[in-house]
Image (cartoon, grey):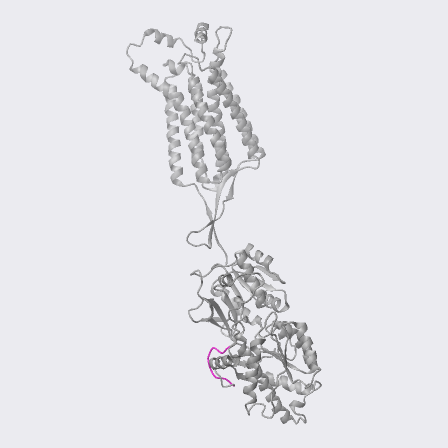
């Protein structure tokens, strides 16, 4: 009896039947094999269904004539269902296509033989392929059947002691869409598939829909699907063109179904001659997806006939009174001879050398094939007997669609994005120039504090404080970390310098404006004395407030440098290389609240200072009044401060742009502040030194002033108010 799946999950029976019929014709025409007998084949479509196949077997067993042996089944699930029962009827079963490793279990299947090597024999070839291309990451996906689960489990056990990692192993029942999504999520590139051909079509179609294809992806399928299997009808609506795209370059790992040596065997046919004769047998019909199995289906009849021929010889030698055609299902002794004879056969078929080992399997060379263009081409032969197994590459070997060997994953290169030295050097140079300018202004302020009215009347002590604040503010441009080891220290120093510098600058501008305001808003028309010590006290109070905020900040949530991952970037030269840049930034968990506190404090100070500058805008004593210059300074600081806050909130992770803009604002704002305040004084002093006829009255008037006391007569206030 023969089990031939003409439809269902695998319908290779449409090719097997004519191949078997051709083998029976050739055998029955010979006189050296079973000369006193004829082989008759009783077959039925089992639809690759174990239930149907089992039902067919029991029906055949109840029909006349008695069957000597069983050919089949084609699908492993059918053979598993029938072979564990057929031996109870003393029947030997030999399959042409079942490759499940479970069928090697002699306790469950004691009289089962097959010409299809179990798929577990392909696992060494798969591992050798991974090693050859130095692939360290692999994924598997298989149908929820024992056949494929056993192969996958064997593969996982074999690679356990290697350096290959399985990123994910997916199992699906009917629709693999969720499992394919998981493969994509895990960035699976090398994917080993275990399923029937109809499910492989679903896998490829769904893979096309989610974009899991292209030169980055390597699909490895079993080798028994047949020619152009990916062009079969699929249930998911993918066109032929789409299936060609997603299947392009896929690999097929299997065993040889035709002898690669092109030698004549027991039948007298070389593989090419057999295929030519088989083509005539089909009478114009074409089944390209199943033609590969024609060789094993032809050879399985020869293997069984040779075993039965040896059984007849053994029966004569041992004095059996029965003929082979008189066998009954109770004759275990004859069945023992049939089984023993199959273990001892050895011949060359169109498939290659055929001999069974103790598990009923044949040992054959493996191969690797690849879809190149529209044809699956043999590109490598795997020899399992040499070392751990090696490949002999033929026909140019594997041709990768992308022009290079696919990577097993995206190559991630972690890149530290440092501040560009050119930018740092440029801005640091400007900051140093600004600090030198501040020192020059400070020297000018000290030298002329007692000799020039323009300098003395503008509070040189407060001006010195302003310049010290400018120097500290400039220094923040220089305090940039290129190393995480000193980054934590620089984070703290920079925030201290910036906060103290702003406090001194704002405090100096604010206090000077406040003094002018107090003097000229004196309604009692009396002499008002405001010492520099009072102004310094105001600056000190502001400084204490800022220092308290910073110290509290450091106690509650100290500034520290951390790595911040920037969005990944794909290399322009190689799409499989991905750069993962990171930057070092100063952060603290509650920095938002503490920053907001400083923003509010400085904002209130700037607004109040602007108000005072506005109120004193009409004061006419130029040597005394800096209100116009102070108002301009405050205006610039407000604009640049708002921009700086926006930049700090939005661009902190973009190191170069953030540093460039913030440093630019600091340099620009600080430079404008000190130049607006001091350039007019510098020009005025220079004008005085070059002027002719400086009156003695002006000199004596200057010498009568004191350093720390500013006296303004009521009449000066009166004239200002009238003006």
Expressed as whole percent of the image width and height from the top left, the position of residue 151 reads 59, 68
Q: Answer left or right for 179 relative to 89.
A: left
Please name whichever residue, 600 or 325, is drawn nearer the observer in this view of the structure: 325
Q: Give the overall secondary structure of the magenta segment.
A: loop
* Vertical position of residue 420 compared to residue 115: above or below: above
| Res 629 visible | yes
Q: Where the N terminus falls, by quadrant?
A: bottom right
Counting from the top left corner in percent of width and height, residue 510 is at 48, 20
For the C terminus, the quadrant is top left
| Nearer-the-camera pick, 468 or 169 | 169
Q: Residue 194 sits in which quadrant?
A: bottom right
Residue 396: image quadrant is bottom left
Q: Residue furthest front?
A: 284
Highlighted magenta segment, given as a residue range: 258-266
| 261 in magenta | yes
Q: Position of residue 109 (x, y in %)?
A: 65, 77
Image quadrant where residue 422 sits: top left
Q: Is residue 166 above or below residue 286?
A: above
Q: Is residue 296 above or below residue 208?
A: below
Is residue 159 at least partly visible in the picture?
no
Tell me what residue is drawn at x 31 percent, y 15 percent.
689
Q: Position of residue 721 (x, y in %)?
A: 46, 8
Judged from this view, the residue extending furthest toward the left is 692
Q: Between residues 129 and 213, which one lies in front from this camera angle?
A: 213
Query: Exactly how many numbered labels are in the figure?
Result: 0
Viewer-nearest residue: 713 or 697: 713
Q: Is residue 457 left or right of residue 16?
A: left
């Amino acid at each position: 009896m023969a089990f031939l799946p003409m439809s269902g999950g695998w319908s290779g029976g449409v090719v097997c039947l004519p191949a078997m019929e051709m083998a029976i014709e050739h055998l029955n025409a010979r006189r050296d094999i079973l000369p006193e007998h004829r082989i008759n084949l009783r077959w039925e479509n089992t639809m690759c269904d174990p239930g149907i196949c089992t039902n067919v077997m029991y029906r055949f067993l109840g029909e006349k004539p008695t069957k000597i042996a069983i050919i089949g089944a084609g699908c492993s699930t059918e053979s598993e269902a029938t072979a564990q029962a057929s031996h109870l009827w003393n029947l030997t079963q030999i399959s042409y296509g079942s490759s499940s490793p479970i069928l090697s279990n002699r306790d469950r299947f004691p009289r089962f033989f097959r010409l299809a090597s179990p798929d577990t024999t392909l696992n060494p070839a798969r591992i050798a392929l991974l090693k050859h291309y130095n692939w360290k990451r692999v994924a598997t996906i298989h149908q929820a059947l024992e056949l494929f689960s056993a192969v996958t489990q064997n593969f996982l056990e074999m690679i356990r002691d290697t350096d290959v990692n399985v990123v994910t192993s997916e199992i699906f029942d009917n629709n693999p869409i969720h499992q394919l999504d998981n493969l994509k999520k895990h960035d699976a590139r090398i994917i080993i598939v275990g399923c029937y051909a109809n499910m492989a079509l679903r896998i490829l179609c769904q893979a096309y829909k989610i974009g899991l294809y292209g030169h980055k992806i390597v699909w490895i399928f079993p080798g028994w699907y047949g020619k152009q299997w990916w062009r079969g009808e699929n249930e998911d609506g993918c066109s032929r063109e789409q299936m060609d795209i997603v299947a392009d370059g896929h690999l097929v790992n299997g065993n040889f179904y035709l002898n690669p040596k092109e030698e004549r065997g027991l039948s007298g046919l070389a593989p090419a001659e057999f295929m030519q004769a088989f083509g005539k047998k089909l009478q114009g019909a074409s089944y390209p997806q199943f033609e590969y199995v024609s060789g094993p289906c032809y050879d399985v009849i020869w293997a069984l006939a040779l075993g039965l021929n040896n059984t007849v010889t053994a029966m004569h030698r041992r004095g059996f009174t029965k003929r082979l055609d008189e066998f009954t299902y109770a004759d275990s002794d004859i069945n023992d001879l049939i089984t023993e004879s199959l273990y001892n056969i050895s011949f060359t078929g169109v498939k290659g050398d055929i001999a069974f080992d103790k598990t009923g399997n044949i040992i054959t060379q493996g191969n690797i094939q690849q879809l190149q263009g529209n044809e699956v081409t043999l590109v490598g032969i795997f020899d399992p007997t040499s070392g751990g197994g090696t490949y002999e590459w033929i026909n140019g070997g594997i041709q990768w669609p992308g022009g290079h060997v696919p990577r097993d994953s995206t190559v991630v290169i972690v890149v530290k994005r440092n501040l560009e030295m050119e930018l740092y050097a440029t801005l640091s140079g400007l900051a140093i120039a600004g600090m030198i300018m501040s020192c020059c202004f400070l020297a000018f302020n000290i030298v002329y504090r007692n000799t020039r009215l323009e300098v003395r009347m503008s509070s040189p002590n407060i001006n010195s404080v302003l310049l010290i604040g400018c120097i500290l503010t400039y220094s923040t441009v220089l305090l940039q970390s290129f190393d995480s080891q000193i980054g934590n220290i620089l984070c703290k120093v920079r925030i201290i310098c910036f906060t103290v510098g702003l406090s001194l600058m704002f405090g100096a501008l604010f206090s000077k404006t406040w003094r002018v305001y107090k003097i000229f808003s004196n309604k009692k028309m009396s002499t008002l004395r405001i010492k520099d010590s009072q102004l310094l006290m105001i600056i000190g109070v502001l400084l204490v407030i800022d220092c308290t905020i910073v110290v509290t900040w450091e106690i509650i949530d100290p500034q520290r440098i951390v790595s911040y991952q920037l969005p990944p970037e794909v290399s322009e030269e190689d799409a499989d290389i991905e750069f993962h840049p990171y930057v070092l930034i100063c952060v603290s968990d509650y920095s938002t609240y503490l920053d907001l506190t400083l923003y509010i404090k400085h904002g209130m100070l700037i607004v109040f200072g602007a108000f005072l500058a506005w109120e004193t805008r009409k004061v006419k004593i130029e040597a005394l009044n800096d209100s116009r210059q102070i108002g301009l300074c405050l205006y610039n600081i407000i604009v640049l401060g708002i921009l700086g806050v926006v930049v700090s909130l939005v661009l902190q992770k973009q190191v170069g742009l953030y540093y460039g803009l913030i440093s630019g604002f600091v340099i620009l704002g600080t430079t404008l502040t000190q130049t607006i305040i001091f350039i007019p004084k510098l020009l005025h002093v220079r004008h005085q030194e070059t002027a002719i006829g400086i009156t003695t009255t002006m000199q004596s008037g200057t010498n009568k002033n004191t350093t720390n006391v500013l006296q303004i007569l009521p009449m000066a206030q009166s004239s200002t108010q009238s003006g």
